[in-house]
Image (spheres, grey):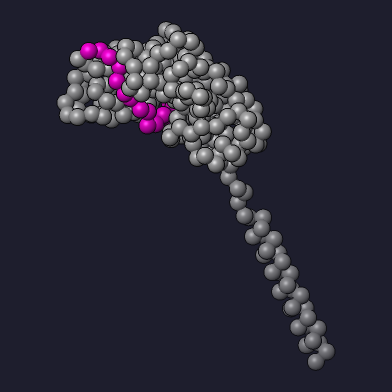
Amino acid sequence: MIYSGKLQKYFAGFSLSLILVSDLVLTQKAPPALAQTVNTSIANAVTFSCNDSEATIKAKNGPKVVNGTTSVYIGYRQLSNNKDPIIARFNNGIKAWCRTDYETTKDDGTGYGLYWNGGSVLYGVFSSTGSQTGNDFRRFAIGRWLPSYGSGGGPKVAVIARINPANGDVSYATFLSAKKADNGQTNSLVVNNLSWNSTNSTLTVQAKSWWTPRRTNTNSMSCSGSSPYPYTVIFTGDLRTMNSASANTCS
């Protein structure tokens, strides 16, 4: 019986050791939490200021792109009589930079989209409702595919800008709009998605264009049916050239 008691204690201790080792193995095999990555974000524009914390901006659920612990947010700041675009970058919850100087005219400009590859490629999508006196995106769009809002005013169009993620500087930009075939005035266009091709350094833009979308030479397409039309274009990365443009029921 003495031998039997010792044997029972031995097996009890051995079983406990197996449980502890098993728990240790399971703990070691548990996969680490994956870093969050959000490359593209298009959403309704939200308002925030450079004085806001990241938690405050994040809670608004506006467009943002994320790479690990770094996030970039875009939106607008509300002034007494108009809106100006704003972008802010946070690293580990600490503000790295915040910019409100992209467009400071009386235009109701907002930011509603971003693409970021996590490295040096960052694009912002902004809205514009017309040209006003002062600093706007035209100063960044000289020599690019479409250098201005164009004629008329009121319809909301898009501005796409290449941005330096290190400090928020705009390197260059292009307007992207529809063009009325009957009088040549600017018509509405809203961007739905951005994607980047790193192999040939091109930017694909998917949008919704009202009558009528533009060809690669900026002239109006010939369309049938009612607008808005699903519209897809491919830009060179420097936004100087549109390589292709297509829209449903348009040519």
- Seen in the image, is 149 located left or right of residue 136? left
In the rendered structure, which segment of residues is drawn in magenta?
183-201
* Outermost residue toward the front in this view: 80
Q: Is 213 colored magenta in this rendering? A: no
* Residue 95 visible somewhere in the drawing: yes
Residue at x 78%, y 88% (from the top left corner)? 4
Residue at x 70%, y 69% (from the top left corner)? 18
The percent position of residue 28, horizontal first and vertical second, equals: 67, 55
* Residue 160 visible somewhere in the drawing: no
* Vertical comparison of 113 with 239: above or below: below
Q: Is 193 colored magenta in this rendering? A: yes
Residue at x 64%, y 27% (from the top left corner)? 96
Residue 101 or 70: which is nearer the viewer? 101
Residue 137 or 118: which is nearer the viewer? 137
Residue 2 or 170: which is nearer the viewer? 170
* Vertical comparison of 166 with 2: above or below: above
- Seen in the image, is 248 located left or right of residue 65? left
* Outermost residue toward the top in this view: 143
